[in-house]
Amino acid sequence: MDHAVSRLLAHERIRAARHHIERTDEVTLARQAALSTIPAPTGAEGRRAARVAELFREIGLSDVSIDHAGNVHGWLGKNGDKSAAPVVLAAHLDTVFGAEVDVAVERRGQRLEGPGISDNARGLAALVAVAEAMVAARVPATRPILFAATVGEEGSGDLRGVKYLLNGRHSVGAQLAAPLPNTPTAFIALDGAGLDRVIHRALGSKRYHVTFRGPGGHSWAAFGVANPANAVGRAAALLADLAPQHAPRTTCAVVRLGGGTGLNSIPQEAWVDLDLRSEDPRALAQLDVTVRTALERAADDENRRRTAGSPTLRVEIQLLGDRPSGITPRAHPLVQAAVAANRALGRDAELASASTDANVAIALGIPAIALGAGGKAGDAHLATEWYENVEGALGIIRALLVTAAMAEVV
């Protein structure tokens, strides 16, 4: 694969595309700032999607559209042919910030500061930059390339956009016709900043809202009835005592809890939110069984201690998120292309895991990775998030090389 990437670096059209990326670095940075100032909370990405669609049309992509889920599509293909298995280069539109957050961007030299400026305004700007460079340089790709900006990648979005893009699923249990005519030959997600990491392991998760319900009552007069708050405490203790699993690393975290209405009332319900994670789907499935058993045990333990004859409490488990796990083997040509691209650009590659849009592709058997889009960043998911354009163009050039390799540029 090193030879293939070296050949691409010497390719006249790829050299022209690289030069375009380097020459328009300031344009890309300005687009990044402008996109970041368009609010895009998960589930409300419409304005930002419309702007990305405009950019796709301006730079010359064909068949630009916004699909049923809200994803933006733009095609670059051999004579407009989309019948062959495409390569997908994607970046997510949404941010973790609500509509109430001021997403203004301030620039201080090469540093941009603002909520979402790296995650994922940088990925979106890089997506547009790769597409523009390939169009401008007339890069001769054998396979069609779909440039996609997806909705619902963050948090409660549960990878909704990419689920719809790849297999027609845009919520748990909902099935529609998949918008792609053929299964992609490769999927590359651009997510945030950075140049070293090549994410080929999908960190899967299951997220639950667990509610314990009981009769409730006065904290003195009804004392002894099954107490949902006690059950939440018992559940949290049982989960905290689970033996840690390191190979593969598998975790269960209590992330939120609540319930009750007053200081002198036993609550009728109390709840706890859980985040289960693993890189291995079998380990995640086994943890899921273990956690459900612990929740039932917490309810049973509280019911055994209740006043005789009083009502039992019950537990309800609601699935809030289901992000699949899996791996694109490090020996796969896609992973090797990314590693070779790093090497050709004078940077070591760190093979890593994360939860990104690539999770869904990997779970569907589609070779997939996620890459940072160059530069440095910090304070992700905080209002003080920043991006510094140090070697920013190199991250975009890496994405260009990997995309070109998978699209079989001739």
Image (tube, rainbow, N blue to C red):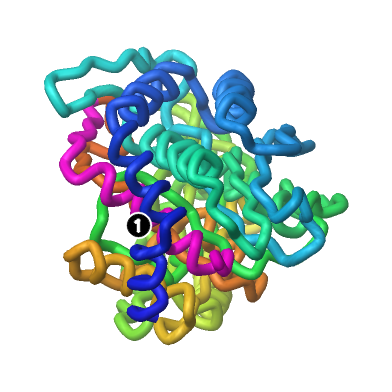
Q: Residue furthest left?
A: 109
For label 1, the SS is: helix
Q: Residue furthest right?
A: 177
Instruction: Write down the residue under mark 1.
Output: 398
Percent x, y of residue 196: 24, 61
Residue visible at 72% across and 66% down in the picture: 85
Percent x, y of residue 25: 29, 33
Residue visible at 65% across and 45% down in the picture: 161
Q: Residue furthest front?
A: 12
| Numbered range of the magenta stretch | 384-410
How many residues crowd mark 1 within 10 Å: few (<14), some (14–19), many (20+)?
many
Based on the picture, tell me whether residue 405 belongs to the magenta stretch: yes
Is 402 placed above or below 35 here?
Answer: below
Based on the picture, tell me whether residue 390 belongs to the magenta stretch: yes
What is the total number of numbered labels drawn onto the structure image?
Answer: 1
Q: Amino acid at mark 1?
A: Arg
Is 68 placed above or below 366 here?
Answer: above
What is the quadrant of residue 109 in the picture?
top left
What is the quadrant of residue 247 in the picture?
bottom left
The one nearer the camera, 216 or 39, is 39
